[in-house]
Amino acid sequence: MMGTKRIRIIGAGAMGRGIAQIAVVAGFAVELTDVSDDAVTAGLDFVGTMLRRSVEKGQRTAQEADAALARLERGASPTAAADDVDLVIEAVVENLEVKQALFAQLEKAVPGAVLASNTSSLPITTIASALHEPSRLLGMHFFNPVPLMKLVEVIPGLRTDPDAVATALRFVEAVGHRPVVATDTPGFLVNHIGRALPTEALTLLSEQVASEVDIDRIVRDTLGLKMGPFELMDLTGLDVSHPVMEIVSSGFYGDPRLRPSALAAVRVAAGLLGRKTGAGFYRYVDGRQQVPPEPTLNPDAAATRIYVHDHPEFAAVLRAGGADVVDKPTADSVTVVLPVGEPTYRTAARAGLDASRTVGIDPLSIAGTRLTVTVPARLDPEAGRAALGVLAATGRAVTVTADGPAPVAQRVLASIVNLACAIAEQGIGRPDDIDVAARSGLGYPSGPLELGEAHGPTVVLRILDGLLDYTDDPRYRASRWLRERAEQGMSLRDSGTRPEQLFD
Ligand code: NAI
């Protein structure tokens, strides 16, 4: 099966037509099929329109577009017999019985072809179990919109023939996309990696540590993600993202790292799905997200004398803002501590400081444009207000959160890195592919293992150990992959020596 030439695409919807477009552009002959003739017509029209538009944009010549379109045809039917089809890509409705019935017919109708399913959530091995030759079937998971999302998960089932995998990889590379190989596990790679952010954000929300908009602001400004978790869930639609959380969580039999949120379930029931219903975690007016304004701050560098415990760098930031920074706490000063992996009140207590006159600053936030302040339950509000005045005088945006088991950005960071490490540990994907999957599939500015490297594996481990110690919630148990690398000074991207390498 070296030379895939002719491809049958089944399902001419959003995904099938996009796959048809990139395949004909790359030089493959494509027959587009669907149960609905109208869907095929619409799919063919769509590809024609997209290719003409690409000519107008100067991306290809009219001759190239015509040649590509000449390679695209309406197939006789999804299950028509053919001996010249090398690869079938199925993108029909997400229903196990429908896909199994279709492939059972196809294995007879197109005897020479590799059979690929674009399913986003059904187990590949289970789809293949309906076949006499399950070795011919694998997952080939594209992302929407296909021409722009340059990532494809290639998922061998447990019985898939390595030659079929090789054919799929060659096809993905030939259309100019980046394949990542994932084992046949719930959520594959991208949807598994992507569970850390929304589940931790919802946990923070349910603990009333911070509001949706504040969590989004912290995730964007401190961790550098383009979108916060709540605006992302609003964009995707909670009717899509909550079931994905449920499928991945139940697929791993309730691993607490993947725990969905009761908050989300009830919001789905209420129809608060996000952008498409005009209301989700945010409200939408004429399609525009309504963002609550930042809280009003009264910058006043002289509001109180301030003591910064054990952090000369942040003391310098405050001095630059004009603050009266003292060398040790006085009766009328307010203290700032910089907690890592613990609540602010504990950092204060360990240092013998008075929590009623102490606020926390997340040390992760001090390099960015937004300071995250944590408020211990025993804080004297007047002391807190004075501290805010001094912090606002630095000119940074300030977000104020409750005192959780660790500051917001630390919890989100540690959850993202730890889940990716657990995925690497289970061999669900290679370290490089995990990072590529998160960057291309989730739009993260850097992959989760890269993110862990940037902040330091020992810091991430310290945050997790602190969270686990405080909450006793196994959600925060560090993966072995993370712990053994942090404790031995290895990179999180290093696969390390495996026993089998001793027998090479
Ligand atoms: P869609 O609803 O836009 O298109 C599905 C097409 O399949 C329709 O034209 C329908 O007439 C046709 N169809 C249904 N049953 C059929 C059958 N038995 N035989 C032949 N054609 C049949 O769906 P979409 O969004 O393109 O999704 C297709 C598949 O791709 C699903 O498995 C979905 O989970 C998966 N997927 C979807 C993504 C997305 O963002 N829309 C992303 C990645 C995967």
Image (cartoon, rainbow, N blue to C red):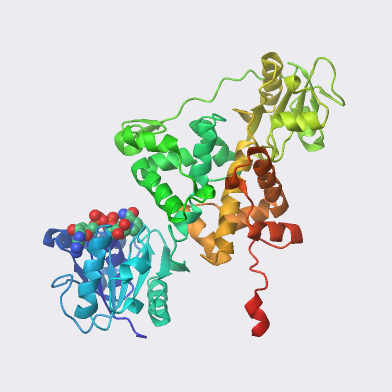
Q: Is residue 133 left or right of residue 234?
A: left
Q: Is residue 412 left or right of residue 147?
A: right
| Residue 71: percent from left, percent from top | 23, 75
**Residue 479 seen in this snapshot:** yes
Give the quadrant of the C terminus.
Answer: bottom right
Residue at 24% across / 80% down in the picture? 85
Q: Is residue 344 above or below residue 181?
A: above
Number of dots carrying numbers: 0
Image quadrant assignment for residue 138 = bottom left
Residue at 54% across / 46% down in the picture? 225
Q: Which quarter is ligand 1 in?
A: bottom left
Image quadrant assignment for residue 310 = top right
| Residue 97: percent from left, percent from top | 24, 62
Q: Nearer the viewer, residue 488 or 71?
A: 488
Residue at the extreme right of the image, as rendered = 327
Give the quadrant of the N terminus.
Answer: bottom left
| Residue 194: percent from left, percent from top | 48, 51
Q: Nearer the viewer, residue 170 or 503?
A: 503
Q: Nearer the viewer, residue 85 or 479?
A: 479
Image quadrant assignment for residue 471 = top right
| Residue 180: percent from left, percent from top | 47, 67
Q: Is residue 141 left or right of residue 457?
A: left
**Residue 145 seen in this snapshot:** no
Q: Is residue 35 left or right of residue 381?
A: left
Residue at 75% across / 61% down in the picture? 488
